């Protein structure tokens, strides 16, 4: 590593924009990887230094360059996905790097890099904000339906990850709000169906119900797995409570049971009803459009005798009264 590279890393850490500009002009290879296998752009992303990142991009910094060796610092990710995984605090950085990746000619990328680009919408929905997600699918009409190697759309991927692994009610609520904002703008995403034909060879089948929607996966598979996991943890806790009541691992297990219980309650009483209500509203809108004379409604349609207020009452009753099998018929 040259002296300019060391000085540039310090300039990034201290946000010395003037010095960074001088050093970037002197460095021969802006994509040089240091001892931690970072490039300068990795370091700019790590410190959320948008100004230096912009200068590096102007000199040809590679947003898709993978580190030669995985470390804790770089997570074995290119700068773009590293930025996405840093979450909403890096929104400006994420938007800038997404704009940069759109200028890359696909034929210049490796197969691994192309797989990463295919995951942009998935990572953007899971880790960042709706604005970044919209940028990730900008200019590509099929990106919000693009499947990963497990056959999951961005919404399926995000809903499964959040509902399966998240233990913070606060994080669940924030991500629910982000997804709700996205599906309000892209309502068809709630109706995209899981297809085993989309699963790449050698990858596991993650959903046992072919044709399931994202919400169907959560309600009928993930929540069952969460309840089973909760029951096992309670059995483990009860079995060890009398023998080692103050053991740190047992105390931590008790806290985990409490956190998971709060998250389960949130998922069942807020998360799932939120998206179910979105889907019912879309069905209500579709019914209204189908019975409208100017939109092609048939004069023989008996539902046309119902007023808009009565239709609203019917759908509100459905929201309350539908059984689990009724919901399964819609979601699976």
Image (spheres, rainbow, N blue to C red):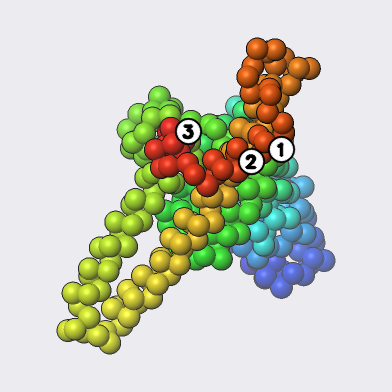
**Occupied quadrant, residue 230:** bottom left
Of residues 104 and 268, the one nearer the viewer is 268
- Report, in whole angstroms, how far the alpha carbon at label 2 lies from the one at label 1: 6 Å
Q: Residue 126, how many percent across, how many down? A: 56, 50
Q: Which residue is at a point 61% across and 48% down the rendered structure image?
A: 179
**Occupied quadrant, residue 258:** bottom left
Find disc 2 in the rendering and name its residue. Answer: 313
Q: Nearer the viewer, mark 2 or mark 3?
A: 2
Find disc 3 in the rendering and name its residue. Answer: 330
Contact between labelled residues 1 and 2, with CB atoms less than 8 Å apart: yes
User: In the rendered view, does 148 fall on the left or right side of 294?
Assistant: left
Q: Secondary structure at mark 3?
A: helix
The answer to whether residue 73 is seen in the rendering is no
Contact between labelled residues 3 and 1, with CB atoms less than 8 Å apart: no
Within-10-Å neighbours for mark 3: few <14, some 14–19, many 20+: few
Find disc 1 in the rendering and name its residue. Answer: 309
Of the numbered discs in the image, which one, if any, rests on residue 241?
none
Of residues 29 and 309, the one nearer the viewer is 309
User: In the rendered view, does 158 fall on the left or right side of 165?
Assistant: right
Q: Which residue is at a point 33% across and 36% down the rendered structure image?
A: 208
Q: Residue 271, how many percent across, how many down? A: 53, 53
User: In the rendered view, does 325 fall on the left or right side of 42?
Assistant: left
Of residues 329 and 241, the one nearer the viewer is 329
Q: Which residue is at a point 65% across and 65% down the rendered structure image?
A: 47
Outermost front residue: 305
């Amino acid at each position: 590593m040259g002296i300019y590279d060391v000085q540039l890393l310090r300039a990034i850490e201290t946000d010395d924009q003037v010095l960074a500009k001088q050093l970037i002009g002197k460095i021969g290879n802006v994509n040089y990887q240091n001892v931690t296998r970072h490039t300068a752009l990795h370091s700019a992303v790590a410190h959320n230094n948008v100004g230096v990142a912009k200068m590096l991009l102007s000199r040809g910094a590679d947003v898709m360059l993978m580190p030669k060796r995985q470390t804790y610092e770089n997570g074995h990710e290119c700068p773009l996905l590293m930025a996405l995984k840093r979450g909403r605090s890096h929104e400006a950085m994420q938007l800038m790097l997404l704009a940069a990746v759109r200028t890359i000619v696909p034929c210049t990328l490796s197969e691994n890099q192309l797989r990463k680009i295919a995951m942009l919408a998935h990572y953007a929905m899971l880790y960042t904000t709706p604005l970044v997600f919209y940028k990730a699918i900008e200019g590509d009409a099929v990106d919000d339906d693009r499947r990963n190697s497990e056959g999951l759309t961005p919404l399926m991927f995000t809903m499964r990850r959040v509902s399966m692994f998240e233990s913070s009610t606060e994080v669940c609520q924030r991500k629910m709000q982000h997804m709700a904002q996205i599906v309000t703008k892209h309502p068809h995403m709630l109706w995209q169906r899981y297809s085993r034909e989309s699963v790449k060879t050698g990858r596991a089948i993650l959903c046992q119900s072919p044709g399931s929607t994202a919400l169907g996966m959560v309600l009928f598979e993930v929540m069952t797995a969460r309840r089973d996991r909760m029951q096992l943890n309670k059995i483990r806790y009860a079995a060890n409570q009398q023998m080692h009541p103050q053991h740190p691992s047992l105390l931590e297990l008790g806290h985990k049971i409490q956190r998971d219980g709060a998250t389960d309650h949130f998922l069942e009483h807020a998360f799932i009803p939120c998206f179910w209500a979105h889907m019912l509203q879309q069905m209500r809108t579709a019914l209204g459009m189908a019975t409208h004379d100017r939109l092609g409604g048939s004069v023989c349609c008996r539902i046309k005798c119902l007023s808009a207020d009565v239709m609203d009452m019917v759908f509100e009753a459905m929201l309350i009264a539908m059984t689990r099998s009724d919901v399964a018929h819609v979601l699976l």
